[in-house]
Image (tube, grey):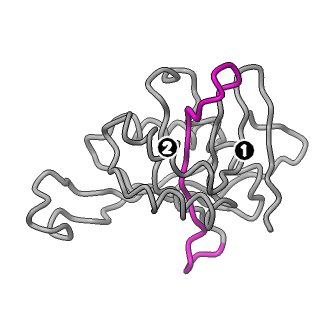
Amino acid sequence: MAEKLKVDTDEYYFRRPTKEDGGPVWELVREIGNLDLNSSYSYVLWCEVFAESSIVVEHKETQQIVGFISGFMHPEKEDTLFIWQVAVSSTQRGKGLATKMLLQLLEWNESVNFIEATVAPSNKPSNYLFLGLARKIHTNWKISDYFKTDHFPAKDEEHEEELLFRIGPMRKNKNKRMI
């Protein structure tokens, strides 16, 4: 069983998710409203099966989950963490929480040399998040075409193309706490 790491800051607990977090994570994503909302089952499963490459943030005062990143190790690129969803409660935005979650995931997963994510061009917060991360950790980034609109079902008229962000290689500094 995976070790359930927990990092304590003044305002938050950063930790790996458990299956018990699946319901609250689903509620967080639903509350945010601008992410693709998957079934509650998928979040329970994700929090159980992909806990090693995902993170939840619990607000100390309210004990509510206010942040979540779902990620997985890319099956064809052993050193690449693929980020699927980044969720931050509207009450916690503007505090750098998404960046702190990504940095914590990198600290927990030392084998990660690259981060990848797909981002719609109109999703400015995610564009800024991933480019800002690359700048913060002083590494390279590459943005390329990935999913075109015709990859999505015709019924999904609102889904725009997704660009692939690739960030890395990571520079390792074992003596520095990232968050």
Specify whether residue 61 is painted magenta: yes
Residue name at image x 77 percent, y 53 percent: 108
Q: Nearer the viewer, residue 85 or 174?
A: 85
Picture layout, residue 131 above or below residue 47: above
Position in image of residue 143 (x %, y %):
40, 55
Q: State if disc 2 and disc 1 touch (CB < 8 Å).
A: no
The mark found on residue 2 in the picture is none
Query: Disc 1 or 2, which lies upstream in sequence?
Result: 1
Dot 2 falls on a residue whose secondary structure is helix
Residue name at image x 49 percent, y 43 percent: 130
Residue under circle 2? 130
Residue name at image x 23 percent, y 57 percent: 161
Position in image of residue 7 (x %, y %):
80, 38
Q: How many marks?
A: 2
* Residue stretch rendered in magenta on the structure: 59-78
Picture layout, residue 11 above or below residue 161: above
